[in-house]
Amino acid sequence: MKKFESYLEEVKENNPDEFSELTEILSRYDTLKTSNDKLHENHKDRIEEIDTLTRKIMNEKKMMTIEKMTINNQIAKQTQRLEEIEDKKSKILATSDE
């Protein structure tokens, strides 16, 4: 404990404009530790939030891919149907011309 006290005394002597008593150093330490703990907690919360948002984005991408494939299938079916109707139309026009 004496070693710790002598270290704090040295800090006080090297920084007379900031610290006039050992209690000021300890108080500063407590303030900084509390702030650091809050920052770590905040950081942890932001990481969890980012992970949640990343999962949501991935799920949304999957849903959009599925929707895109469904729409492409519908377009292909409608295109095939259009081609069949145009073939029938061409046959009917060819028959009516004869």
Image (cartoon, rainbow, N blue to C red):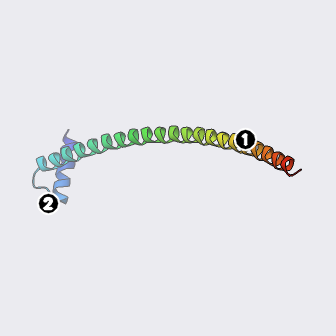
Marker count (numbered): 2
Q: Give the crowd class for mark 1: few <14, some 14-19, many >=20 residues within 10 Å.
A: few
Mark closer to the observer (2, 1): 1
Q: Is residue 97 left or right of residue 5?
A: right
Which residue, given by chain and number where applicable, does mark 2 sit on? 16
The residue most toward the right is 98
What secondary structure is marked by label 1? helix
- Residue at 63% over, 40% down: 69
Q: Residue furthest bottom?
A: 17
From the viewer's side, name the closer residue of 1 and 35: 35
The answer to which of marks 2 and 1 sits earlier in the sequence is 2
Asked whether, in this view, residue 15 is left or right of residue 70, the answer is left
| Residue depicted at x 86% and y 46% | 95
CA separation, marks 2 and 1?
Answer: 89 Å
Side of 83 relative to 63 (left or right): right
Q: Secondary structure at mark 2?
A: loop
Q: Give the amino acid type for the residue marked by disc 1 in the picture.
A: Arg
**Residue 56 image position (x, y, % from top left):** 46, 39
Label 2 close to label 1 by CB (< 8 Å): no
* Picture coordinates of residue 98, whole percent (x, y): 89, 50
Residue under numbered circle 1 = 81
- Disc assigned to residue 92: none
Does 40 appear above or below 13?
Answer: above
Residue closer to the observer: 89 or 81: 89
Specify the quadrant that holds the N terminus: top left
Identify the residue at horizontal 78%, vertical 47% (top origin).
89
Bin the neighbour count of mark 2 within 10 Å (Cα to Cα): few under 14, some 14-19, many 20 and up: few
In front: 26, or 49?
49
